[in-house]
Image (cartoon, rainbow, N blue to C red):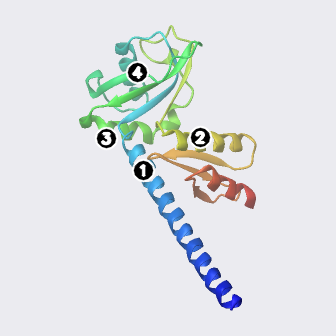
């Protein structure tokens, strides 16, 4: 009777719900894999933040060379394939993308491994740039999703809700107020940490 139909209907619904969960998990894994591939495509880049907007490409190359000198990494302008402003704001500064040549990727890794020394560098302290009164920073370029996670985590550090956040090899990490390190794959992962605090 009707109870048999209801049981069969319930079994079908349960099976469809499980298939839906499985598909959602597969979509999530595909998105995660695509994010990794997109981030890997940026693995030859360095981001310089707060650069004056009226600098020529050759001056931008020289700026990267001087920044590398600051942390003891020797490069030349010929190790850089391309430089460009990420966008030009109406203000006086903008982020700059530096793309390294294939043969210079180890120098890029060395520079980024010392990026904690490259936060708020006065351009005046760099040879050939003494007329610029800006403080610049160096970091990895991230895809938009990971950059949003980084920015959100930085705000939570400023509010004292987590201890620290950093980027390493295109991935965003945080240390909670108990000193435990977490990989932040999304803002939801950050939310989970904050809920525990």
Tell me how far mark 3 sits from mark 1, CA to CA: 25 Å
**Which numbered disc flags the more N-terminal residue, 1 or 2?**
1
**Which numbered disc flags the more N-terminal residue, 4 or 3?**
4
Tell me how far mark 2 sits from mark 4, CA to CA: 22 Å
Q: Which mark is residue 106?
A: 3
Judged by depth in the image, the label closer to the viewer, 1 or 2, is 1
Tell me how far mark 2 sits from mark 3, CA to CA: 27 Å
Kindly indicate whether the residue at mark 3 contacts the one at mark 2 (C-beta within 8 angstroms).
no
Categorize mark 3 by other alpha carbons within 10 Å: few (<14), some (14-19), many (20+): few
Q: Which mark is residue 84?
A: 4
- The furthest residue to the front: 1
Kindly indicate whether the residue at mark 2 contacts the one at mark 1 (C-beta within 8 angstroms).
no
Judged by depth in the image, the label closer to the viewer, 4 or 3, is 4
**Which numbered disc flags the more N-terminal residue, 2 or 3?**
3
> Residue at the spot x=68%, y=58% of the render?
192
Q: Which residue is mark 1?
A: 34
């Amino acid at each position: 009777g009707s109870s048999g139909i209801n049981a069969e209907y319930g079994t079908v619904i349960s099976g469809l719900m499980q298939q839906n969960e499985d598909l959602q998990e597969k979509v999530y894994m595909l998105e995660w894999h695509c994010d990794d591939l997109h981030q890997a495509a940026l693995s030859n880049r360095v981001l310089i933040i707060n650069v004056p907007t009226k600098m020529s490409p050759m001056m931008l190359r020289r700026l990267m060379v001087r920044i590398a000198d600051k942390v003891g990494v020797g490069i030349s302008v010929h190790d850089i394939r391309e430089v460009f402003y990420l966008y030009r704001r109406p203000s006086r500064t903008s982020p700059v993308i530096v793309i390294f040549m294939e043969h210079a990727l180890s120098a890029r890794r060395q520079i980024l491994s010392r990026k904690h020394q490259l936060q708020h560098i006065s351009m005046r302290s760099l040879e050939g740039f003494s007329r610029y009164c800006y403080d610049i920073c160096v970091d990895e370029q991230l895809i938009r999703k990971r950059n949003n996670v980084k920015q959100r985590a930085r705000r939570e550090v400023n509010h004292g809700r987590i201890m620290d956040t950093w980027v390493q090899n295109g991935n965003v990490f945080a240390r909670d107020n108990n000193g435990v390190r977490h990989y932040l794959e999304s803002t939801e992962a950050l939310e989970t940490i904050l809920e525990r605090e």
